[in-house]
Image (tube, grey):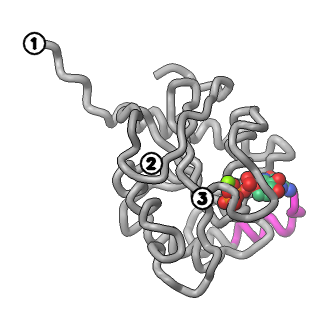
Amino acid sequence: MKRINFKNSRFVNTFVNLPLGGIRPKMPKFCMVGRSNVGKSSLINHLCDSPKLAKVSSVPGKTQAINLFDIDGQMYLFDLPGYGFSETGKSLRHTWGSLMENFLTEYRPHVLLLTDSRHPLFESDLQMIEWMRANALEYTLIVTKSDKLNASQKHKKTEEIRAKFQAHPLFYSVHSVEGKNTLLQKLHMVAEQQHEKEPPLPALA
Ligand SMILES: Nc1nc2c(ncn2[C@@H]2O[C@H](COP(=O)(O)OP(=O)(O)OP(=O)(O)O)[C@@H](O)[C@H]2O)c(=O)[nH]1
Ligand SMILES: [Mg+2]
C-alpha cells in the first residue's frame, strides 16, 4: 500500500440509504462518529488541509446524511451526522437512526469516536462505546477542541478516560498541530491492517 499523504482528498457522494452505490469494496474505511457539534467535519478538513471539504457549522446538526470522502485514492473517510440531541436514554436506533446503525454493522469502518474536551462523556457516548463493543467494531477515542483545555484539565480528562475505558485519549485541536501527526500515523497503520485483511483477488483462469 502506498503512503497516504492526505493532500489529495475529494468529496465523493452523499448517501441517505444503503447499499452505498459505486464504492470500491476493498478500500480501507474510517468514519467520524460523535455528538452533534463535537467537531467531526472540522477534523476531516484539518486532516486533509482543505478547509471547505466537509461542511462545518456552529449550529448543531449540520451534517445530515452519510458523506463520503476519498483520501488519496487510498482510503475512504465517512462523515456521519451527530447523535445525542436527546439524552433520555432511548436506544441508539431512536436517537440516531437505523441508517447509521446498519451502515456501521454492514460496512464495518474503523470508527473515530469524537468527544468534546469541554464536557464529560455523555450517556450517548457511553452507549455508543458499549454498542461498538457489542458489535466488535474497532474504534479510536479522540478528545476534540483540546485548545480549550489547560494542562491540569487535560490531566483530569486523561484520568476520566483511563478510568472508564482503560484507554489513553488522543487530544486533537484544529487550531494547532496537537494530535494531527499521531492520528495520521494511526490511520495509516489501521489502513494497512485493513488492506492486509482483504483476501487476494482470485487468479484469472
Ligand atoms: N475551539 C475549537 N473549535 C472547534 C474545533 N473543532 C471544531 N470546532 C468548532 O466546533 C463547531 C462544530 O464543528 P463541526 O465540525 O461542524 O461539528 P460536527 O461534529 O461535524 O457537527 P454536526 O455535523 O452538526 O454533527 C464549529 O463552530 C467549529 O468551528 C477545535 O479543535 N477547537
Ligand atoms: Mg458535521
Which residue is at the front of the view, 36 or 119?
Answer: 36
Question: Of all residues shown, which one is farthest toward the front?
Answer: 16
Residue located beneath label 2 in the image: 109
Stretch of the chain drawn in magenta: 145-159
Give the amino acid type for the residue marked by disc 2 in the picture: Pro
Q: Which residue corresponds to mark 1?
A: 205
Location of residue 110 with respect to 128 vertically, above or below: above
Q: Give the left or right position of residue 44, taking residue 150 as reference.
A: left
- Nearest to N terminus: mark 1 or mark 3: 3
Q: Nearer the viewer, residue 38 or 151?
A: 38
Specify the quadrant that holds the C terminus.
Answer: top left
Question: Quick check: 176 above or below 101?
Answer: above
Which element type, helix, strand or loop, lies under badge 1?
A: loop
Q: How many marks?
A: 3
Q: Who's the residue at 56% across and 22% down the image?
A: 3
Q: Which residue is mark 3?
A: 81
Q: Dividing the picture into quarters, in which one does residue 166 lie?
A: bottom right
